[in-house]
Image (cartoon, grey):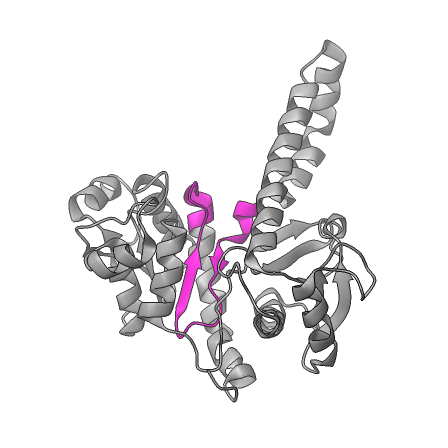
């Protein structure tokens, strides 16, 4: 039985969607136990009327909530009884195998390092979401944790990303590329130019060189390496363009009687295609390199993404990703 703590109070639609996602997860699998962390009355109100195996969901009371606009360091220090701090302490103390939250990104990043702690040898834990591509999925690492990364950080991101893609997603010898403004080795800013030769020398990854942003949706690499500023811009643009195109396609199909007839004919195939580009299918972004598993989901996550984030934790735990990161980076000094 894998135990996943869920921040019931984090996110735009908390606690309703967080609770629904937890219920969906335990109804799908019998080997998961979910610990909902939050204000008892609010969570119990959402649970009432839901059908689920009672022994697979428990509630841990946390009286405080960290809001997104609060300074992360102060919030983690002062709000000891917040759902984020209480949930992360469950992981630290071995009372939960993982923690999932759609709450304050800053608080999750700070709490992950301060409370759960880094694996020895890991310089900076990166956020690493799976993004849909023409060929399946790619791992974008880092997408929001380390804006001012150094070359050595990016090398570690590449190595941790390779481990994740091989053992969680099942891609053997995953292709690793660094985000750049051109394919030539001499191109890029100072960070990319310094990192490129280090990645070439790295024997435990399959480094294929630079990747331009336009090649990412085509699945040009399995692990997309960049610092957090670039990664976050890629992720947000990706999401924005995807939502805009879907909206425009749906709108265009309703412009005339002929287009409506055509829409009926292509609807099954189009629905399946659009489903494959739905990022919520892939769960949240794990904060790799910590002693325990912490997963950050979108602030606007609905039940489906919450459920998939919980299920994602099972694969992570079964494949012993933390142990594999320790083996890969554990000989290095902190």
Relative depth, front residue between 242 and 237:
237
Residue 332 at x, y = what percent? 52, 86
Relative depth, front residue between 250 and 190:
190
- Residue 305 sits inside the magenta stretch: yes
Q: Is residue 117 left or right of residue 137?
A: left
Question: Which residues are drawn in magenta?
Answer: 279-306
Relative depth, front residue between 88 and 98:
88
Task: Name the image quarter holding residue 31.
Answer: bottom left
Q: Residue at x 56, y 53 (%)?
A: 229
Furthest-right residue in this view: 184
Q: Is residue 20 left or right of residue 60?
A: right
* Residue 214 visible within the image: yes
Q: Residue at x 48, y 80 (%)?
A: 323
Residue 41 at x, y = what percent? 16, 44
Residue 73 at x, y = what percent? 31, 59
Relative height, residue 255 to residue 233 (above, below)? above
Relative height, residue 52 to residue 121 (above, below)? above
Q: Residue at x 65, y 20 (%)?
A: 251
Furthest-bottom residue in this view: 331
* Residue 57 visible within the image: no
Q: Is residue 136 left or right of residue 318?
A: right
On the rendered image, what quadrant is the N terminus found in?
A: bottom left
Q: Residue at x 61, y 58 (%)?
A: 140
């Amino acid at each position: 039985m894998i135990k996943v703590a869920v921040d019931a109070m984090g996110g735009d639609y908390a606690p309703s969607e967080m609770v629904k996602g937890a219920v969906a997860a335990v109804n799908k699998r019998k080997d998961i136990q979910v610990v909902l962390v939050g204000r008892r009355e609010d969570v119990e109100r959402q649970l009432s009327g839901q059908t689920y195996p009672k022994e697979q969901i428990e509630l841990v009371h946390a009286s405080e909530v960290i809001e997104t606009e609060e300074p992360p360091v102060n919030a983690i220090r002062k709000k000891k009884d917040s759902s984020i701090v209480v949930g992360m302490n469950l992981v630290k103390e071995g009372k939960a195998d993982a923690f999932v939250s759609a709450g304050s990104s800053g608080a999750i990043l700070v709490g992950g390092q301060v409370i759960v702690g880094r694996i020895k040898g890991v310089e900076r834990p990166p956020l690493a979401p799976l993004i849909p591509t023409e060929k399946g999925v790619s791992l974008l690492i880092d997408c929001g944790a380390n804006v001012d990364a150094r070359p050595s950080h990016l090398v570690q991101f590449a190595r941790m990303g390779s481990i994740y893609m091989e053992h969680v997603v099942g891609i053997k010898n995953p292709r690793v590329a660094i985000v750049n403004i051109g394919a030539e080795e001499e191109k890029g800013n100072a960070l990319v130019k310094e990192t490129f030769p280090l990645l070439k020398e790295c024997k435990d990854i399959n480094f294929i060189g630079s990747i331009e942003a336009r090649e990412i949706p085509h699945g040009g690499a399995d692990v997309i390496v960049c610092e957090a500023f670039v990664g976050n811009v890629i992720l947000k643009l990706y999401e924005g363009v995807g939502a805009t195109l879907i909206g425009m396609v749906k709108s265009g199909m309703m412009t005339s009687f002929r287009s409506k007839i055509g829409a009926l004919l292509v609807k099954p195939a189009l629905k399946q295609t659009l489903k494959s580009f739905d990022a919520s299918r892939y769960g949240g972004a794990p904060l790799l390199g910590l002693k325990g598993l912490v997963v950050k989901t979108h602030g606007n996550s609905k039940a489906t993404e919450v459920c998939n984030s919980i299920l994602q934790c099972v694969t992570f735990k079964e494949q012993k990703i933390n142990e594999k990161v320790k083996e890969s980076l554990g000989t290095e000094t902190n």
